[in-house]
Image (tube, rainbow, N blue to C red):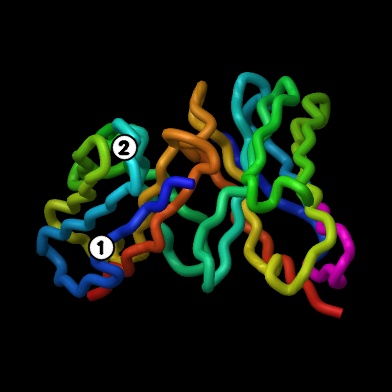
Amino acid sequence: QVQLQESGPGLVKPSETLSLTCTVSGGAISNYYWSWIRQTPGKGLEWIGYIYYSGNTNYNPSLKSRVTVSVDTSKNQFFLELSSVTAADTAVYYCARGRHGYSGQFDYWGQGTLVTVSS
Amino acid sequence: DIQMTQSPSSLSASVGDRATITCRASQSISIYLNWYQQKPGRAPKLLIYAASSLQSGVPSRYSGSGSGTDFTLTISSLQPEDFATYYCQQSYSTPHTFGQGTNLEI
């Protein structure tokens, strides 16, 4: 059974960089798309971007200037960096897998991690 | 970006009832429409992909239909575990976008 687990700081200061790791277990990271998605009470679910196992990326234009997603296939992990954060970036962050061959059908999700942006 | 609009925003129903949730896309998305269920404190769970295909392990009382801009999620006979929030999401183009959610309550 594939499992995803987010990890990283739960508190980030304004203007700093949010960094999260998603560790994939029970299956290979190869041949799939891997996404980051966040959820806030105000904006709902927002897709941040994806990385294909080979390293190709696609980002939400609303965040593109601040987002970097990377992958380490040897460790079965992928990563999110979001720079210059503000309170508006406070959210529950999820990592998710795209169904085989499809970037946008999310069949496995992590449990989510709350990141609060505050000084 | 493609805007996804769900209706209703909330729905009250009883166990055994049939529930229908609709989703409209701001432009044609063919059948690239997915449905998720989310319970409080949990991640969304994929129910239906490609408008009408049932994800493995999802009960057959769930069904989806539609194409183009108008889609429907139907739960044929509500069970206690079905009371949750439901989201539609388009995977036709990036950025992948979600509806605002429908809260299905008892």
| Residue at the image point whose x is 21% and y is 61% from the top | B79
Front disc: 2 or 1: 2
Farthest left residue in view: B17
Q: Main secondary structure of the magenta part?
A: loop
Task: Identify the mark nearer the N-term, 2 or 1.
Answer: 1
The residue type indicated by label 1 comes to Ser
Question: Is label 2 in contact with label 1 (beta carbons under 8 Å)?
Answer: no
Spot occupied by residue A39 in the image (x, y as percentages of width and height): 57, 62
Left or right of B46 on screen, residue A47:
right
Residue density around tag 1, few if under 14, some if 14–19, many if 20 or more, within 10 Å: some
The residue type indicated by label 2 comes to Ser
> For this rendering, which residue is in front, B27 or B81?
B27
- Where disc 1 sits, the SS reads strand
Q: Say if the magenta span includes residue B36.
A: no
Per the image, the residue denoted by label 2 is: B28
Spot occupied by residue B59 in the image (x, y as percentages of width and height): 25, 44
| Residue at the image point whose x is 23% and y is 75% from the top | B106
Spot occupied by residue A46 in the image (x, y as percentages of width and height): 55, 55
State whether residue A60 is above or below residue B30.
below
Is residue B55 visible in this depiction of the protein?
no
Per the image, the residue denoted by label 1 is: B7
Residue density around tag 2, few if under 14, some if 14–19, many if 20 or more, within 10 Å: some
> For this rendering, which residue is in front, B22 or A109?
B22
